[in-house]
Image: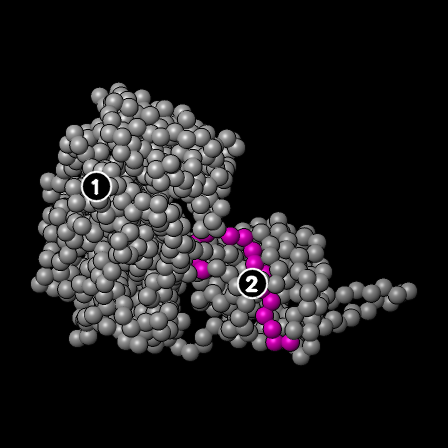
Amino acid sequence: MSALIRSRRRLGALVITSSLVVSGLGVALLAAPADAASTDVLITEVYGGGGNTGAAYTNDFVELTNNSSAPVDVSGWSIQYASAAGSTWQVTNLTGTIAPGAAYLVQEGAGAGNGQPMPTPNVSGGIAMSATAGKVALVTNQTALACGATCHADAGVKDYIGYGTATDFETAAAPGLSNSTSAARVDASTDTDNNGADFAAGNPSPGTVTSTPTEPPVDAKIHDIQGAAHLSPLAGKAVKNVTGVVTAKSSNGFWFQDPQPDTDPATSEGVFVFTSSAPTVAVGDALTVQGTVAEFRPGGSGGTDNLTTTEITNPTITVTGTASVPAPTIVGPGGRVPPSTVIDDDSNGDVETTSTAFDPANDGLDFWESLEGMWLGINQPEVTGPTSSFRELSVVPAGSSVRTVRGGILLQKTDSNPERVLLDDVLTPIPDAKTGDKLAGVVPGVLDYSFGNFKFLPTQTPTVIDGGVQRETAQRSSPLQVSVATFNVENLDPSDGEAKFDGLAQAVVKNLAAPDILGLEEVQDNDGATNSGNPAANLTLDMLVAAIQKAGGPKYAYRQIDPVNNQEGGEPGGNIRVAFMYRTDKPVKFVDRPGGGSTVPTTITTDRFGRPHLSSSPGRVDPANPAWEATRVPLAGEFTWHGQSMFVVVNHFSSKGGDDPLWGRTQPPMQVTAAKRHQQAESVRGFVDQILAKDKGANVIVLGDLNDFDWSETADILVGSGKTSLIDMPRTLPLPERYSYVFEGNSQILDQILVSRNLQPASTYDVVHMNAEFPDQISDHDPQVVRVIPLPSWVH
């Protein structure tokens, strides 16, 4: 803008600057150099949509640039902001020096957490700027402006921009903005003191001296914009004469599609137009759109694992008539058939930079990308997982393979099921449905992407066809068999209320047939998430014991060890842990041996006959091992059944939280949490080896929520090798029955029971499918039960 001290009035093209000086009897009119455009520091970019829905970045920002050949010290300066018609100015103080040609980034307030993370700013403030209209001043002092609503000519103002409907500006206002657009100088080195001419709306670029593109918009079709790639070949460019028909609307934009597609199936014919506020177009309108092509990465500050979606921002929309919405492109038999096994096999890192081919015929990631924004239909989609709390529902087209016995789809080591897609409730409610159901007719919608998944957005609520799947019940054990179960009770504590305890009790009594021994995971302390400092869980377990009796079940006793407060992961304050319950009316007995504690390891001792025992029962396994940091320490218990010893270890290994999503930007996905589970498996395997070293025929059962698959290295480590290897009971099932959990529509094993080899021949085993496939769950895991006959070691 102009020089440091000025008082200006504009008369057409004439700028008059005046200062009266009184000296004796004379009055002189002195000219000041205030009207010259700034030759050093300018405001080069302003963005107020930070963190909002559809935001490009998490924070508002103002960018300055030093166009001089010498450093400029801005210590004592400030950035100030007022609303479009406001007279009160908020201040962010500046510090430091701006080098010649360098950008200086002033980070301001954050919205709701949407958008990409900001680059490191030079200074941070907390001003919440308007996304659409406002006033920003670069001031050479740090005192809030007192000039009211009109301050562009104030003496302390170094540079100034009014944007949108601002009532004050230099000559003319800069364009109105949105959550996805900033006002940037057309030429970062030029200041004509005309905000309307000097600034244009475009994609934000904080901390980078980037002029807004001045090249004229290019004619483009939607398939030109989408291109045969994950990123648009026209990203950042202005486009015009983009034609299509509106297929669907959201609260901040609309999808439209070219009814005259090209012949390349790799290029999508639909795209989202971001309008920031509710669009005024109607479904069926024929349009011509002009705007800027942008790649939006959804997911807020945590969205760096997400792919981008291509959209047109800052649009100018012309309705040219009405037209029939094109028939939806069918996904599945009779239409575009998705790949059946591979998500991506030609990338090594960021698919946007390392992919060697865009291959929709082979790679699921590329297949769905080639349909992004398009108007699609799935004929009688089959439900592979229950409606989630986020109102998402996983479906596959008819005819998909590797199905479970109850209509799910099985996750395997070499098959991540790329035919899956999640229905989401962005445009219409999603009904409750369970695994094995179908949806009636052709379900129409548009394809989007968010939170690590492609999302199919229906435009009308689908009708559910009941698949008839019922909750399973386990068979009862014979008088010679002891039944041992594992059950993740999902953060159970007294505040969950009577309904949850009664539901769990019904599951134990009816669905699990009241097992003799029950290993529990996710038992919380008596006050749940309240961080009281007291980790005791006796009230939680007493309530479950009472609920089981109320449901007509037997009397259970329990054993557990309180963890060190807030040291073992899970919900803060909840003190999650594992525990044993066992029936008091059966021949199963718990061998109580004192000495156990939260930090005390149980070891293996022998009696005078050389038979192994636990030094403390219940006792914790290897609690000082770093593998258990912020993770539940396993609990070992010594039992007898008709006098025969049994050793049971209940586990809850580290979660997969933090691993790359299957449908993420990084391919192949990195399982960063796996190494810790491997260490945990080695710890438990070492404990089992100590028992079997004393008696290779000992009756050992290892069970719990291992947070890893039956084909994983974690499971391999626990199994071991040779004569002391354990039998992983899920691996004894046929493939279509190997699952205890459903995540994003993939049926998979996370909970496991492993038994010593001597127990397996006379055993029977069930995964009791009663939770994971249903939207009304009392836990997100299915319990499991094994029935074995413990024998004295000399029999083996």
Q: Is residue 486 left or right of residue 202?
A: left
Seen in the picture, residue 12 relative to 387 is either above or below; the reply is below
Which residue is disc 2 drawn over? Answer: 120
For mark 2, does the 10 Å Cα neighbourhood hold few (<14), some (14 to 19), or many (20 or more) residues? Answer: few
At which x and y percent is residue 337?
A: 14, 64
Of residues 742 and 589, the one drawn nearer to the viewer in this rendering: 589
Q: Mark 1 points at which residue?
A: 795
Q: Which amino acid does label 1 sit on?
A: Val
Q: How far apart are marks 1 and 2 (CA)?
A: 69 Å
Q: Which residue lies furthest to the front in this view?
A: 608
Instruction: Please report whichever mark, 1 or 2, sits nearer to the chain's N-terminal start.
Output: 2
User: Residue at (15%, 56%) from the top-left corner?
Assistant: 402
> What are the residue bounds of the magenta stretch?
100-116
Left or right position of 131 against 784? right
Residue 61 to residue 734: above or below: below
Instruction: Give the amino acid type for the residue marked by disc 2 in the picture.
Output: Thr
Residue 721 in percent (x, y) is at 28, 56
Residue 46 visible (yes or no): no
Instruction: Judge by depth and name the residue closer to the eye, 325 or 359.
Output: 359
